[in-house]
Image (cartoon, rainbow, N blue to C red):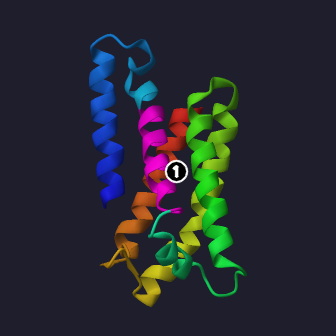
Amino acid sequence: MIVLVVLFGSWLILRGIGALGVTALATWHDSVRYALAVMFVFTGVAHFNKMRRDLAQMIPSFFPQPMLIVYITGVGEFLGAAGLLIPRFRSLAGICLVLLLIGMFTANVNAALKGLTLGGRPATPLWLRTPMQILFVGLIWWATH
């Protein structure tokens, strides 16, 4: 849930800054790219702090080296966030982030089905995680095309 707060809170703040005259944030469409970048930096950090162990437990057991996967997906989130802000890489970043989210959804499903906790809190239930993922994918696609 905090991810939604980060996304929508930063989107509103950034759009407000755009309304004050910052042309890079002049539209909802422009400001959502920056808000998505903020969200992916926020979630990417978790791949390198104490949350990384909880994230590794989310990865289905048939994948080898879950901690390596956590690090790789964290780097992917950082690269995707940067790519959203660079016009030349925006489209590619959007495609890669959508694929990353689809891949990471398997970990979210696994965590929900196993009743895992993240930072001491239950994993997001699938009835909420599924529409969140669809929302993230839709916003990324809209922001990059």
Q: Is residue 96 above or below residue 132?
A: above
Residue segment shown in magenta:
32-48
* Quadrant in the picture for the N terminus: bottom left
Q: Give percent across and percent down for residue 7.
A: 36, 45
Task: Write the residue at 63% across / 24% down.
Answer: 87
Task: Write the residue at 28% across / 31% down.
Answer: 13
Between 99 and 22, the residue placed more toward the observer is: 22
Task: Write the residue at 49% across / 48% down.
Answer: 40
Tell me: 61 left or right of 2: right
Res 84 quadrant in image? top right
* Quadrant in the picture for the C terminus: top right
Disc 1 marks which amino acid? Val
Q: Is residue 61 magenta?
A: no
- Disc 1, SS: helix
Residue 98 appears in view: no
The chief SS type of the magenta part is helix
Tell me: 5 left or right of 57: left
Q: Is residue 51 above or below residue 32?
A: below
The number of numbered badges drawn on the structure is 1
Q: Is residue 33 magenta?
A: yes
Q: Give percent across and percent down for residue 90.
A: 63, 32
Residue 13 appears in view: yes
Tell me: 51 left or right of 65: left
Q: Give percent across and percent down for residue 86.
A: 62, 27
Task: Write the residue at 38% across / 27% down.
Answer: 28
Q: Which residue is mark 1?
A: 137
